[in-house]
Each structure stands twice: as structure tokens, then as C-alpha cells.
Amino acid sequence: MGSRTALVEDLMERFPHVPREAVFKEDLLRGGVAFDPSALSDNEGGEVKPKSYFIFSFDHGTLPELGEAALRRPPEEIILTGGPYDLRRTVVSVRVNPASPYRVAADEEGLLGLYLDGRRIADVGVPPMPEYYRHTLSNGKSVMEVAPTIQWGYLIYLTVFRVCQYFGAKEECQYCDINHNWRQHKAAGRPYTGVKDVEEVLEALEIIDRYDTAKASTAYTLTGGAITKTVSGRDEADFYGHYAKAIEERFPGRWIGKVVAQALPKDDVQRFKDYGVQIYHPNFEVWDEYLFKMYCPGKERYVGRDEWHRRILDSADVFGARNVIPNFVAGVEMAEPFGFKTVDEAIESTTEGLRFFMSHGITPRFTTWCPEPTTPLGKANPQGAPLEYHIRLLQAYRATMDDFGLSSPPGYGPPGPGRAVFSVSSFMDSLPAQDEPRETPEQRGTPETAQA
């Protein structure tokens, strides 16, 4: 097509049951957005909440390649509203790409907007600096470094282990830049704590709890790299679990406790539960058997795809199926050199995985793949997956949930366009608001109808 605008409008017309907000959000997540200097933050000394790099870079360039955006961080997220498409409030995680056709800039009156092909398509809101970011721990560390918040303040993201023990080309997941992100922040002289001390985490949470008077922070996620041996003398379940235990003892019931970890044996999963974790995310990454082996070599070597899936199902006996929410990285299904060549094939494969888990009452969620340039798949696929794949995935995801009578998973805030706060994919934006009736397959349109 002649322009990015034409492509986006064509997809909105072809898939009318996918919210138009989600179409733009997926395009921004998959391809990134450029920032005019007028739209950058003043880091932690300003009025705008800056990007925290909470686990991965989620950028289309390394820090030295981002120009001024590496010195004055962009905002953590942006909100899109209005414009010629009359967009409802849409929260989007910021992924910087200086070459993106999308650009955030201020107009003559200083009002931020999102521009595509030179045309202003939405007003842009940026997150205000939260009061708790203005306070430091007793050792001088910032709250943003120890306990950053995302999803417009809904989620406290505790990356307590900043690297992964799947290391090197034969073990690292081929789309993941957690280890490089650690290296680039250290090389830039930025504070980036490798293993966070539990007392530092508790002190940061005390500051958040004290100054978050509106109680906007509702959940926390404990996560980090995979642990194949030990960290600080603890195995994976005990390492991540002991943070949960400390948090729940200090702040009983204050937040929904979630942990992102490997698919562990049932006894280890029970330890998470005993420590006070409420939601378990044993991410399955990619469904296809061959692609799992090629793109997740460490996980295949140490656990294996079939065993990984068995453990996910077993964990439902511990947490209840509704509280087991495995993530997958949407888009790597189409990554060269081994991925599917057509959108049809990729959607068929991913939907097979959705049906497998949802038939057991388990509702996966997904993160939109950002092809970070230091990863093997990012280098080979700088454009990521086609936007059509992401739009059709939203359609397939909602249809599969409806087929099995499932609702939006807990711990992600409200569903629905104009309401969702989950910022790294549009799956919550594409689901019905809780007070909206479900559509029948006939009402939402069959795939054949939607693609006509």
C-alpha cells in the first residue's frame, strides 16, 4: 500500500470487530514510535514519569542509537485519545524507534500529539511523575530502580533478578534481550541492580504504599531471569517465593501477588502458593513444537516443551485454572528463519495453543513481540511480524475465549476499549468490558466474513 495510514485503515475496515484503538496500539508495539525532543521527559527530575526499562529494553535500537532519547528518557507509556479516528483512552507501552512512521511531538501550542505520515491522528497524554518516585530509599536508590510501576500505575514490576541463567546462543531465548539490557545499562553507567535485596524491595513498597493515596497500584509482579542453578543459595521457587513471603507478611492483602517463573514441578509451584502468591505465570512463549525448540533452546534443554505444558496444567491444581496465566510472545511465530511464512499458518498454530489451554480453563495472555536488535530474531526480523497477524490474533483470541466461556484473567485491570491499562499488548483492549454482553459467533462475524 502507498502509506502506513492506508494499511492501517484497510485493516480496520477488514476487521471491524477488532477495536480501532487496538489496531493502532499493536502497530505502535510491534514497530515502535519516534519521539521529537519536545516529547521527551526530564528523567527523574521532571514532571513526566520516565521509561524505567523494567526488564527488557523494548526498543528498536541500543541506547547509543537512540540519540537524545537515551539521555532524556521518553515517558514510560502514552495515552492516545481523540483525533480523526475518535480514539478512546488507550494506554500504550513506549518502544522507541527513531525510524518509525509514528512520531510523538508537541504542536505550536505545546500540546502533544501522535503523527502518522505527517498527519496528527491522536492527542497524547503522558503519565505524571508519581509522588512516590520523588522519594529515595535510605541508601539513596530510587523507587523507580527498585520497584517501578507500569500500566498507568496499576502494576508494580519487581524484576528482582536482572539477568538470566540461560546464557549464550545455545540457551538464551532467541527473542529475549534481558541479558543485553543488563549489559547496556551498566555500560551507560545507569543504576541497574542485578539482584535486588528483599529489604530494599520492602522499603520501596513502603514508600509506594505511603504516597499512593489513591491506591492506584493494585498488583505486583515478581520476575526476572530463569534460574537453572541457584541465586543467593536459593532455587527458583525459593528465590522468587521468599520475596512474596516477605511482601505478604509486611503488607497482607495490599496488592495482588503475581510471579512470572519457569514452569516448575508441582511441589515447587505449591511453594509459591504457600508463600502467598495468588497468580502464576509459567510462560509458554510460543506454541509450535519446532519453533519452541529453535527459539527457546534453554527451556527445551532443561525442561522440554511437553513437560513444560504438563507442568502448566498441573499448576492449575494448585492455583486454580483461572489463576494460571501463561504468556506467549505474539509474533515470533512468523520470525525468520524458521517461522511460518503466512499469517494463516501462524494464526492456525497459535489458535491451536489457545484452544489447548483454554479447554482446561487456563487463559493465556500475550506480549506483542518487539524485535530488539541485539537478539538473533530481532536482527533477522527488524520489521517484526505483519500487523495483520497481530490484528487477526486479537480476533482469534477473543473468539476462543468466547468458545470456552472464559472471561478476562484476574490481575490485569479492567478489560475493554477505553478502559484497559495493560500496556504491552492489546488483548485486554479487545475484550468486552465487564458490563458488556458477550457476542455470539454470528454477531462477531466468522473469520471468513471478517476477512471478506
Image (spheres, rainbow, N blue to C red):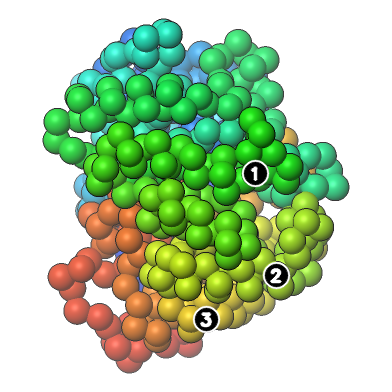
Which mark is in front, 2 or 3? 2
Mark whose residue sits in front, 2 or 1: 1
Q: Is residue 230 left or right of residue 282?
A: right
Report the residue marked by disc 3: 355
Amino acid beneath label 2: Glu
Residue 315 visible? The answer is yes
Which residue does the image show at 43% across and 54% down from the upper left? 274
Residue at the spot 25% in from the left edge and 80% down from the top edge:
438
Q: Earlier in the sequence, mark 2 or mark 3?
A: 2
Q: CA distance from mark 2 to mark 3?
A: 18 Å
What residue type is disc 1 on? Asp
Residue located beneath label 2 in the image:
307
> Where on the picture, by quarter, is residue 104?
top left
Which residue is rendered at x = 46% and y = 67% of the image? 318
Instruction: Between residue 437 and residue 274, name the one nearer to us.
Output: 274
The answer to which of marks 2 and 1 sits earlier in the sequence is 1
Residue 333 locus on image (x, y percent): 67, 64
Relative image position of residue 59 (x, y in whole percent) = 57, 35
Task: From the viewer's side, name the closer residue of 162 and 448.
Answer: 162
**Residue 199 screen position, x and y as percent:** 43, 23
Secondary structure of residue under mark 1: loop
What residue is pinned by disc 1?
Answer: 235
